[in-house]
Image (cartoon, rainbow, N blue to C red):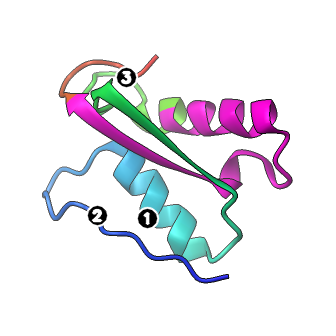
Amino acid sequence: DNWAAVFTTNKFPGAPVLVGKDRLKGGGPLHAVVINNKVSNVCSGGDGIADAELVCESVAASLQLPGGGKTVLPSSTGDIVCRLL
């Protein structure tokens, strides 16, 4: 399978961007994309990467995806400095 994505060129990308780039760089399968709005998960003061990974794991568990959260690509848009969880 081949995947492509367009990411921000911002010098301070949010956790979903970092996690998403890591997923595509890894070259593994992707089974789902999770998109949230209202909260960007950027500069939130928490562990944004852990929050993004937890959301991906939750989606994978709910959908019973083989490979778990590593097969879910996160995407977020919305307010900056608010925590996702």
Of the residues tagged 2 and 1, which is closer to the observer? 2
Q: Which residues are magenta?
A: 52-78
Sequence-wise, which precedes: disc 2 or disc 1? 2
Disc 1 and disc 3: Cα gap in Å? Answer: 20 Å
Q: Which mark is residue 21?
A: 1
What is the x, y in percent for residue 17? 36, 53
Q: Residue at x 40, y 22 (%)?
A: 84
Q: Is residue 13 magenta?
A: no
What is the x, y in percent for residue 29? 71, 69
Q: Residue at x 26, y 18 (%)?
A: 82
Amino acid, disc 1: Lys
Q: Are marks 2 and 3 in contact (CB under 8 Å)?
A: no
Q: Are marks 2 and 1 in contact (CB under 8 Å)?
A: yes
Q: From the image, which quarter does the N terminus lie in? A: bottom right
- Near mark 1 (Cα within 10 A), the count class, few <14, some 14-19 or many ≥20, is some
Q: Residue at x 85, y 40 (%)?
A: 64
Amino acid, disc 3: Gly
Could you tell whether 55 is left or right of 1 in the image?
Answer: left
Answer above or below: position of 75 versus 38.
Answer: below
Would you identify the image quadrant in which residue 36 lies? top left
Total numbered badges shown on the rendered structure:
3
Q: Are marks 1 and 3 in contact (CB under 8 Å)?
A: no
Residue, disc 2: 7
Of the residues tagged 2 and 3, which is closer to the observer? 2
Amino acid, disc 2: Phe
Sequence-wise, which precedes: disc 2 or disc 3? 2
Q: Which mark is residue 46?
A: 3
What is the x, y in percent for residue 49? 46, 39
